[in-house]
Image: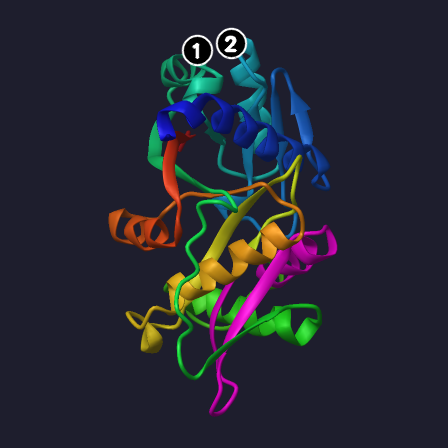
Amino acid sequence: MPDQQEPYVDLDVQNHVRTLALRSPGHVRVGPFTVRYNADWPIPPVNYAVPDHGASPTADDIKALIEAFRERDRLPRLEFLPSCAPDLEPALLAAGFTVERRAPLLACTPESLVTPPPVPGITFTVLSDEAGYRAAAGVQHTGYGLEGEGTDGEIGALRSVTEGGGVAALGTDDTDGTPLAAGSCSIPVDGLSELTGLAVAASHRRRGIGAALCGYLTAQAFGRGCRTVWLEPGDADVERIYASVGYTRVGDKTDMSLV
């Protein structure tokens, strides 16, 4: 049951995010925080701080954290599970931070995975070369409403995932090989992996491709030894798609920033 899994999944997810932050190049420790800093990719979703478990920061801790972001020309920003650091949000609000987003956490296990039916004319493949990373980054870039081609940061992120033991995949049209769907499951930590960056070309949405790719990536992660795959749905409609594949709500996550 979700309410039985929640404390377990919350702690494991927070440890997963913190561990990957500690492994990231250029990360910084500031008081009870680990700052994940991406020198080549300035967008907020890849530059954020993660609190230690049970963190109860002082005003000076938060001031030093803000300075660390400002020195690197990044938006001061945190991603955390309130259940793992209950004192954090009030301290951040007092320092002028605001809540960007509250998102549910969904998780899937090998026992709960529901394999979606295949989509005729679409083939999914695991990425392993630069051409694949570039094609997948392009799908993600335009799939999230951006113009132009995939950036070096997006390409590098997919490369890092696969080189670190995670999995990235691309969906293509069988008729002409056009890339039309992409996503990845992050580097695993203690059997956990995050499904992220799932995107489908606007021309091919509402055909079951997103659900099929979700199922494909999740199964690939389980095949590599993961025991749980978790994710944050973008909205209620997307949450329903993930639920159809066997994901259930197990907790909540908060993003906060200081403009």
169 or 31, which is in the foreground?
Answer: 169
31 or 73, which is in the foreground?
Answer: 31
For disc 1, the marked residue is 87
Q: Residue at x 64, y 35 (%)?
A: 21
Pick out the residue farthest to the front.
111
77 or 200, which is in the foreground?
Answer: 200
**Disc 1 residue crowd, few under 14, some 14–19, many 20+, Cα 10 Å:** some
Instruction: Please give the range of residues in magenta.
Output: 154-183
Image quadrant holding the N terminus, namely: top left
Q: Residue at x 60, y 52 (%)?
A: 221
* Picture quadrant of residue 27: top right
Residue 111, image x, y percentages: 49, 45
Q: Please determine whether, in this image, residue 190 is positioned above or below residue 127.
A: above
- Check contact, mark 2 vs mark 1: CB within 8 A: yes
Residue 18, image x, y percentages: 61, 30
Q: Residue at x 43, y 84 (%)?
A: 121
The residue type indicated by label 2 comes to: Ser
Q: Along the horizontal axis of the image, is 156 left or right of 104?
A: right
For disc 2, the marked residue is 56
Q: Please determine whether, in this image, residue 202 is positioned above or below residue 73.
A: below
Pick out the residue farthest to the bottom.
175
Residue 67, image x, y percentages: 57, 25
Whether residue 251 appears in this view of the structure is yes
Q: Which residue is drawn at 49% across and 91% down?
A: 176
